[in-house]
Amino acid sequence: MKLIFFLFTCLFLFTTLTAQEQEEEEKVIKVEIVKDSSFEAADTFGNNEIRVNFLDLLLFPAFHGYYERIVDENSSYGIGLFVNFGETLSSDVVQRRFAISPYYRLYFLNRRDYGTKGIFVEAFSSFATSKDKNSSNYDEITDRYIERDNIFRVSIGVTFGRKWISRSGYTYEPFVGVGRYLDNQGSNGSNPEVHFRFGLSIGKRY
């Protein structure tokens, strides 16, 4: 009788411990499933993004658009296109008329939600045409510089910014950067040796 009672007690304890272990394993599995599914939203937006810098539209006016290709959650590359529609050139500012700017980005603090967002550092190059005010003729009647010559300039630089992305795939990013020209056009004072980049871009990832 004692042997039967001892065996029944051991069987009861073994069954209870096994049930508890199964419940703990089910909880762990449920947590892992939720964690993995939270990153699936990144793929629904695709690996492409287009943006427009609305600050340039207000200041110049000019069109400044970007295309970005997502490599992974931490990096991307793309190209920017700048076209200045303004005609007036002040006596102390050299305007960039047209520019193509390829770039490469590294993103940080972006492992939550959708990836390729958050703080970023961008290395870029710029191939641009500008108006040289020293090669222009000043018209006193119209109070404007006329017959300006285009000059071609190449620069490299770095940009810092931060990107936010909504659940619908729309993006917003403020940024600021600086580039240095690789030519000697600025040595005679006719053109600046550096140029600055800043803006507020809104886009869509698809």
Image (cartoon, helix red, strand yellow):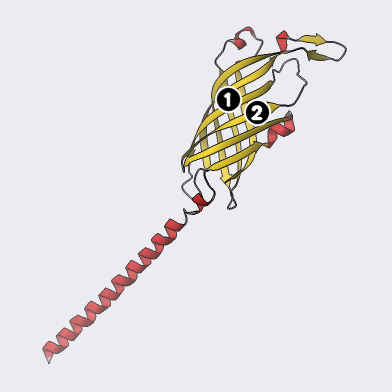
Q: Is residue 192 visible?
A: no
Against 29, is 50 above or below?
above
At label 1, which amino acid type do we have? Val
Q: Is residue 157 visible?
A: yes
Q: Residue at x 63, y 29 (%)?
A: 81
Against 139, is 119 above or below?
below
* Dot in front, 1 or 2: 2
Circle 1 residues within 10 Å: few <14, some 14–19, many ≥20 = some
Relative image position of residue 53 (x, y in whole percent): 66, 35
Left or right, residue 33 beside residue 13: right
Gap in angstroms between the C-alphas marked 1 and 2: 16 Å
Which image quarter: residue 146? top right
Relative image position of residue 87 (x, y in whole percent): 77, 22
Q: Residue at x 78, y 8 (%)?
A: 137
Against 170, is 195 above or below?
above
Tag 1's secondary structure?
Answer: strand
Q: Which part of the image, by quadrant, shows the N terminus?
A: bottom left
Q: Residue furthest bottom?
A: 1
Q: Residue at x 53, y 47 (%)?
A: 46
Against 100, is 183 above or below?
above
Q: What's the mark number on residue 178?
A: 1
Tag 2's secondary structure?
Answer: strand
Question: Which residue is label 2 attached to?
Answer: 82
Left or right, residue 22 beside residue 165: left
Q: Residue at x 80, y 10 (%)?
A: 138
Circle 2 residues within 10 Å: few <14, some 14–19, many ≥20 = some
Relative image position of residue 69 (x, y in whole percent): 52, 38
| Front residue (pair 77, 185) | 77
At label 2, which amino acid type do we have? Phe
Of labels 1 and 2, earlier in sequence is 2
Relative image position of residue 197 (x, y in whole percent): 62, 28
